[in-house]
Image (cartoon, rainbow, N blue to C red):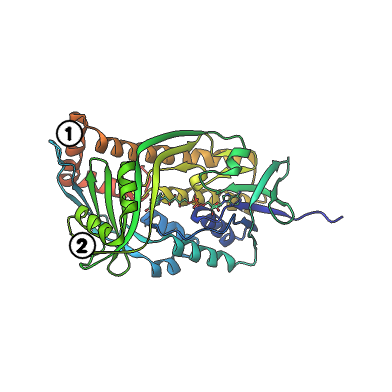
Amino acid sequence: MTARKIHDVAVVGAGPAGLATALGLLAQGISTALITGPERRADHRTTALLDGSVRILEGFGVWDKLVQEAAPLRDMRIADATKRLVRAPEVTFRSAEIGLEAFGYNLENDKLRNVLLEAAQGYETLTLLRTSVTSLEVGPDAATLHLEEGEPVLARLVVGADGRSSIVRKTAGISLRSHAYPQVAFTATVAHTRPHEDTSTEFHTPTGPFTLVPLSGDRSGIVCVVKESDAHHLMSLDDTALAQEMERRASSILGAFTMLPGRGSFPLGAETAVSLHAPRIALVGEAAHIMPPIGAQGLNLGLRDADVLVRLVSQAARKGQDVGAVDLLSQYERERRGDIEGRMRAVDLLNRSLLSDFLPLQGARGFGMYMLDRVGPLRRFLMRMGVGERAA
Ligand SMILES: Cc1cc2nc3c(=O)[nH]c(=O)nc-3n(C[C@H](O)[C@H](O)[C@H](O)COP(=O)(O)OP(=O)(O)OC[C@H]3O[C@@H](n4cnc5c(N)ncnc54)[C@H](O)[C@@H]3O)c2cc1C
């Protein structure tokens, strides 16, 4: 009997985090098996990829293809629509202030995934398996992945990129810290009669942000954070009534709306894996952390996971070291933990300040926005943090 091939890395899950990780590894000459999971349904959501992610995807050699599908986010406007006693001033952040052409770029999730998959398929060193992992065993030299169809796959390192219900995370016995919010994100896409001028607008409402994010042409993605009952109501409206309701919530700043296909409703929660690694296993993307869709941080965080892991694995491979070694995985945890926890706290604080009727907290948010409007260095520091730079 011939010995089975041992891959350097097996990536489980072909969502955007898994695809980006596989692509980054392949670009570094690492032999990679990608186990896609079940065929995905159409995903009409859009994702804003901030400047830090653009740099990562440039490094993975795929940005020039993605940018053709994306709309730039040059300015970001935040308006207080809470109608509370203490209201924050309207603030507009301009990417030019921090020397960027755009804070980031927004594109449809399906386009993002298709471009990443096509790019990964361009590498002969990719083993693409269109099936699911059913179980996983970890041995001293390699992990064995059992699949729904076909022979088991062996790898020195397993990357769990299999999303919020990650089988890799569960099998590794890694638990989650979870927090549910009393809100739901309603998502839709609209065409509008006025141009968005590459500006995203976030209205802060008492139930959460209502955000319009530019897409190519006169189109925008909407993420509307509301109470569950309101989300049910929005889901039940016909296209004409929904367009009118969305336009009202947008104060008609983009003119009249027409609904485009696809709407969705996502309960808000925050979940963090208590560890990002286990023997021969590393978690990336939503297998490791789920964020509320506020401030476009979720996948941007997942791409930074991919970036760090690709760097550590390729360094080890160049030195002829084990790419699934404990030291490497502990280093991955050290480099990623602070960023993940910090972003979780920032998004949580912003969300709580919107929901809270506690006057001092509303005052603090109003004061914070006032300071952001007036104090240049603070503004620029936060803009840089927002697009994915790390604090010195
Ligand atoms: C409304 C909303 C708006 C958002 N907007 C933004 C934004 O603007 N910017 C941003 O950065 N983030 C945003 N996010 C977050 C972003 O969508 C997620 O972070 C991202 O989609 C997660 O990608 P992933 O690859 O980790 O997981 P997923 O996309 O869930 O992919 C996991 C994959 O694993 C596969 N899989 C599952 N089980 C198995 C198995 N047993 N074997 C093999 N494969 C398996 C699945 O089929 C799937 O393809 C938003 C989220 C929401 C809800």
Q: What amino acid is found at the position of numbered circle 2 in the picture? A: Leu
Q: Residues within 10 Å of mark 1 (few under 14, many from 20)?
A: some
Residue bearing mark 1: 363
Task: Count the labels in the image.
Answer: 2
Residue at 73%, 44% (x, y): give it: 141
**Residue 312, position as x, y percentages in the image:** 56, 48
Instruction: Residue 254: give its label.
Output: 2
Rendered view: 338 above or below 78: above
Helix, strand or loop status at disc 1? helix
CB at mark 2 closer than 8 A to ligand 1? no
Rendered view: 229 above or below 97: above
Contact, CB < 8 Å: mark 2 with mark 1?
Answer: no
The mark nearer the N terminus, 2 or 1, is 2
Residue at 87%, 55% (x, y): give it: 1
Rendered view: 11 above or below 341: below
Q: CA distance from mark 2 to mark 1?
A: 30 Å
Residue 61 in view (yes/no): no
Q: Quadrant of residue 227?
A: top left
Q: Residues within 10 Å of mark 2 (few under 14, many from 20)?
A: some
- Of residues 380 and 122, the one nearer the viewer is 122
Q: Quadrant of the C terminus?
A: top left
Residue at 57%, 39% (x, y): give it: 277
Residue 361 in view (yes/no): yes
Q: What amino acid is found at the position of numbered circle 1 in the picture? A: Gly
Rendered view: 381 above or below 29: above
Helix, strand or loop status at disc 2? loop
Horizontal side, residue 42 vs residue 380: left or right:
right
Residue at 60%, 43% (x, y): give it: 167
- Of residues 274 and 27, the one nearer the viewer is 274
**Residue 127, position as x, y percentages in the image:** 66, 61
- Of residues 115 and 384, the one nearer the viewer is 115
**Residue 191, position as x, y percentages in the image:** 28, 66
